[in-house]
Amino acid sequence: MGKILTEAELRSGTVKREGNKVFVSPDTFVTELAREYITTHALELVKTNAVTTPSHSGGSFGKGVMSYTPIASKGAARFVDYNTGKGYAEKPEHMTHLRGNLLVPKNDARILFRGKLDSLEALIMQTQITAEECGYEVIAKELDEVMEFVQQILAHEVKDEPLPDIEIFGMDSAALRYASHHLKEVFGIDHSVPHYSMGKICVALNTLRTFIRETELAAAAAFTEGTTVTRPDIIEALNRLSSCVYIMFCKKVSGKYD
């Protein structure tokens, strides 16, 4: 995960700008609020490989995974309703950005799915804190990779681009599925029923696993049109992500982290 462009950075002036142009590296991750700020203030996002922040910040933009996609204006309108094609001079409060200045209602299934991903990231961080408090820094570090995977899903969904091949902890999709279904062979234990007596780490990992399942259901709702699944890559990725966290849970139960 590289540099993230936030609304706060745009407001604070820590981003390189010339007139109405904002310069970022080609794949900088641009948050929803930052994209809204760019559109509202009629700014232009320019992607270049030679970008540094103003001298007072001393930093530079690294490689990220999401960029703003400009949409041609419709007459005097700066925003376009994705579903109806209607133009808006100002963004209605009940709508939000799908991509660029394409708007959808805030209860659109794709926006609800993005909200689930946002909540999932928060829960990952909470689990990392629990892991560190309990002395399992290795689990906290492994969850960094889980976090990067979730951020990658979000970025590629917003950009409407296919996900790269799944790989977490050095395992591809097939390996993750195999390990989660053959616990006796891999970890020497049977499938365990979660119980509070297993301790904080196991409970936290199980909670994280269940929320990933909820996020997968949100993805299924967002990307299923009749009998057609428009983003099977995202649904598979979340399925394997839940397998990944279940593997971590089983490693803890089997004493692998101890």
Image: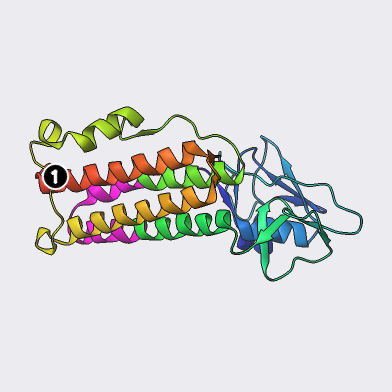
Residue 69 picture quarter: top right
Residue 169 part of the magenta segment: no
* Side of 72 relative to 248 (left or right): right
- Identify the amino acid type marked 1: His
Question: For residue 66, which quarter of the picture?
Answer: top right
Q: Which residues are magenta?
A: 125-144
x, y (%) of residue 13? Answer: 68, 60
Residue at the spot x=36%, y=42% of the render?
Answer: 239
Q: Is residue 98 above or below residue 157?
A: below
User: Residue furthest toward the right?
Assistant: 75
Q: Main secondary structure of the magenta part?
A: helix
Hey, which residue is sitting farthest front in the picture?
227
Q: Position of residue 148 (x, y in %)?
A: 42, 44
Report if residue 119 is visible in the image: yes
Q: Which residue is mark 1?
A: 191
The structure residue drawn at horizontal position 36% and vertical position 45%, both measured from the top left corner, is: 146
